[in-house]
Image: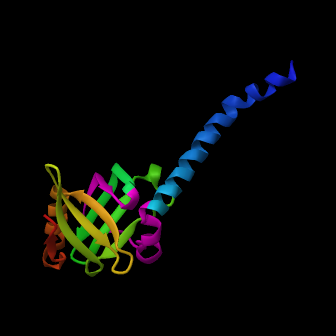
Amino acid sequence: MHNSYLPLIYLPLTLPALIVGLWLVVCVIVSGLGGWASLAGQYGCREDFQGARWTFQSGQMRWYMGYNNCLTVGADPRGLFLAVFPLFRLGHPPLFIPLNEISVTRTRILWAKQVRLCLGRELQIPLTIRATLAEKLRAAAGSSWPVETDSE
């Protein structure tokens, strides 16, 4: 066998490893750029969240880091729960942010009503979600939900 073809024999073995490695690196980069990693340092969820939750939700954090249909979002009178679908979890531990550490602003982009949550009193990491999801969270949090402002 000619030596120049030897690397091609290993391609079926190395290609999956390269793809998985790239996947993991991208997950960690998105976590850092979007602000999830910063939030995890202060608000990592250490217990099982028991409140209302909604799976396969979408949101956008800073630097346009989008989490499309991969978020589990929940709320109770104590706080906001966020988790990422397990396939994307590297760099994204579940979060639990007390409601008194969140500010809420209603906004509109073109025709779509959205809500911007600023997470962490000092960190101020933005998470923009659909207004319909915000209404569900508000109902689950009850009177503990932060006072909302309008940017319109």
Vertical comparison of 7 with 41: above or below: above
Q: Where is residue 94 in the image (x, y as percent from the top left)?
A: 41, 65
Q: In this view, does 103 lie to the left or right of 43?
A: left
Residue at left offset 29%, top offset 71%: 118
Q: Please identify the residue farthest to the top as the structure is shown.
A: 1
Q: Where is residue 150 in the image (x, y as percent from the top left)?
A: 13, 68
Q: In this view, does 2 lie to the left or right of 124?
A: right
Vertical comparison of 57 with 73: above or below: above
Residue at left offset 55%, top offset 51%: 24
Please tell me which residue lies in front, 26 or 10: 26
**How did the renderer colour the structure?**
rainbow
Q: Position of residue 121 (x, y in %)?
A: 33, 80
Please tell me which residue lies in front, 35 or 23: 35
Q: Where is residue 32 in the image (x, y as percent from the top left)?
A: 49, 63
Q: Is residue 30 left or right of residue 76?
A: right
Residue at left offset 63%, top offset 41%: 18
Please tell me which residue lies in front, 80 or 60: 60
Instruction: Verify whether residue 56 appears in magenta.
Output: yes
Tally the marks: 0
Name the quadrant of the C terminus: bottom left
Name the quadrant of the N terminus: top right
Residue at left offset 42%, top offset 61%: 34
Q: Find residue 20 and report its image quarter.
A: top right
Vertical comparison of 68 with 123: above or below: above
- Is residue 18 visible to us here? yes
Instruction: Verify whether residue 57 appears in magenta.
Output: yes
Question: Which residues fall within the magenta stretch?
Answer: 34-63
- Is residue 51 visible to us here? no
